[in-house]
């Protein structure tokens, strides 16, 4: 499938003077070489940031994501777990590792032991704090734009997915203190480029047993204030039968001075009983059930520094962990990666 076979984008970009790398990426895409085109545009944008190239990358990744779903493998396999499970952090009680230590086998071992892996310093402090500031700026830009208008710098530019895909959740995301990463080509590039430099593309692909795709609806740039309420949940309960990994990346110090996550760092192989005291949504789990499932390990609120990431799948039990007495908001990126063989229905795919 060529780049323009689903939608005629040539007319949209005819008045824009495009870089030679963009024209070469079009040629590669026309031959079905989407990932070669993505790599070419990524390297071009690393060398010289360009909002138009970042928009083209978003389009290329979306078309590649559709291809992945249409040609998904039949029986992908998880890797065998490593012989050694990473040690649990003294405070987090989650298995912890550095990006240099991260392998698919180590990740599998951590998931089977505790349902998660905390990876420190996926993004350096300065970069994480800059992305947090960019989230605030994207909110400001979004508020100033008229409906259908785009920011020329790429802080806010609503994604228009291919038919029949739709993104109906924007109002709900905005009310929750977020902006979809797919609606900010600049920050989508920053996020995925950071993950690739931390070797996450290779690790996630090998872990899932297939090239991953994120979802436009489940990849969110968030600002959580201390008064935000949280409810225990497992994301698979409303995403369906999926093959997944979430990279929850903190962009600010949180857990003590800002909202973090409350987690049950225990492997669950099935969905917990929903409902009970204090629940108000049909997928929520009560505090009593979470405490029971946490067992001797107990419920934990890890402290994250800017650039730390918690990796987990759709069975992991967690909620926003906040306290009105906390002085600061928390900035984070939530990015769900799915195996195309079990990609959630009605979600907009974006290849990694």
Image (cartoon, rainbow, N blue to C red):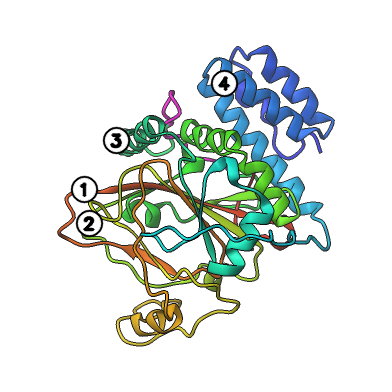
Measured in 3D between alpha carbons, the distance from the residue under mark 2 to the one under mark 1, in whole angstroms, is 7 Å
2 and 1 marks in contact (CB < 8 Å): yes
Question: Going from the N terminus, do you reach mark 3 or mark 1 first?
Answer: 3
The rendered magenta stretch, by its main secondary structure, is classed as loop
Label 1: how many residues lie within 10 Å, few (<14), some (14-19) or many (20+)?
A: some
Q: Separation of disc 4 and disc 1 at Cα?
A: 32 Å
At 57% across and 15% down in the image, what residue appears? 47
Real-space CA distance between mark 3 and mark 1, rounded to the nearest whole angstrom:
19 Å
Q: Earlier in the sequence, mark 4 or mark 1?
A: 4
Q: Secondary structure at mark 1?
A: loop
- Could you tell me residue 201's position as x and y percent? 65, 42
| Quadrant where the C terminus is found in the figure | top right
Give the percent coordinates (x, y) of residue 164. Answer: 65, 53
Q: Nearer the viewer, residue 228 or 97?
A: 97
Mark 3 = which residue? Answer: 140
Provide the residue designation for mark 1. Answer: 328
| x and y percentages locating residue 236 in the rendered image | 56, 69
Foreground label between 3 and 2:
2
- Residue 334: x %, y % from top left: 46, 51
First reached walking from the N terminus: tag 3 or tag 4: 4
Q: Residue at x 45, y 81 (%)?
A: 293
Q: In front: 80, or 126? A: 80
Q: Which residue is mark 2?
A: 226
Q: Quadrant of residue 288?
A: bottom left
């Amino acid at each position: 499938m060529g780049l323009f076979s689903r939608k005629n984008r040539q007319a949209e970009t005819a008045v824009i003077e495009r870089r030679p790398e963009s024209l070469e990426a079009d040629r590669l895409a026309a031959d079905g070489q989407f990932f070669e085109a993505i790599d070419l545009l990524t390297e071009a944008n690393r060398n010289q940031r360009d909002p138009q190239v970042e928009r083209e990358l978003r389009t290329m990744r979306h078309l590649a994501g559709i291809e992945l779903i249409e040609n998904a493998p039949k029986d992908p396999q998880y890797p065998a777990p490593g012989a050694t499970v990473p040690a649990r952090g003294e405070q987090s009680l989650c298995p912890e590792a550095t990006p240099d230590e991260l392998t698919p086998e180590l990740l599998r071992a951590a998931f089977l032991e505790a349902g998660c892996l905390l990876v420190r310093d996926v993004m350096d402090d300065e970069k994480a704090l800059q992305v947090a500031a960019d989230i605030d700026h994207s909110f400001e830009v979004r508020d100033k734009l008229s409906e259908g208008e785009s920011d020329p710098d790429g802080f806010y530019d609503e994604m228009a997915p291919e038919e029949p895909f739709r993104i109906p959740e924007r109002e709900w995301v905005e009310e929750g203190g977020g902006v979809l990463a797919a609606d900010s080509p600049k920050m989508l590039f920053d996020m995925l480029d950071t993950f690739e430099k931390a070797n996450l593309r290779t690790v996630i692909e090998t872990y899932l047993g297939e090239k991953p795709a994120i979802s436009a609806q489940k990849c969110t740039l968030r600002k959580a204030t201390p008064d935000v309420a949280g409810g225990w949940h497992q994301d698979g309960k409303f995403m369906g039968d999926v093959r997944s990994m979430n990279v929850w990346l903190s962009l600010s110090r949180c857990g003590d001075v800002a909202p973090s996550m409350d987690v049950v760092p225990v492997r669950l192989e099935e969905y917990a009983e929903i409902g009970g005291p204090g629940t108000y949504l049909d997928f929520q789990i009560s505090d009593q059930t979470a405490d029971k499932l946490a067992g001797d390990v107990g419920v934990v609120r890890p402290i994250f520094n800017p650039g730390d990431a918690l990796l987990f799948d759709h069975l992991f039990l967690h909620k926003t962990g906040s306290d009105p007495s906390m002085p600061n908001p928390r900035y984070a990126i939530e990015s769900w990666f799915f195996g195309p063989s079990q990609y959630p229905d009605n979600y907009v795919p974006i290849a990694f």
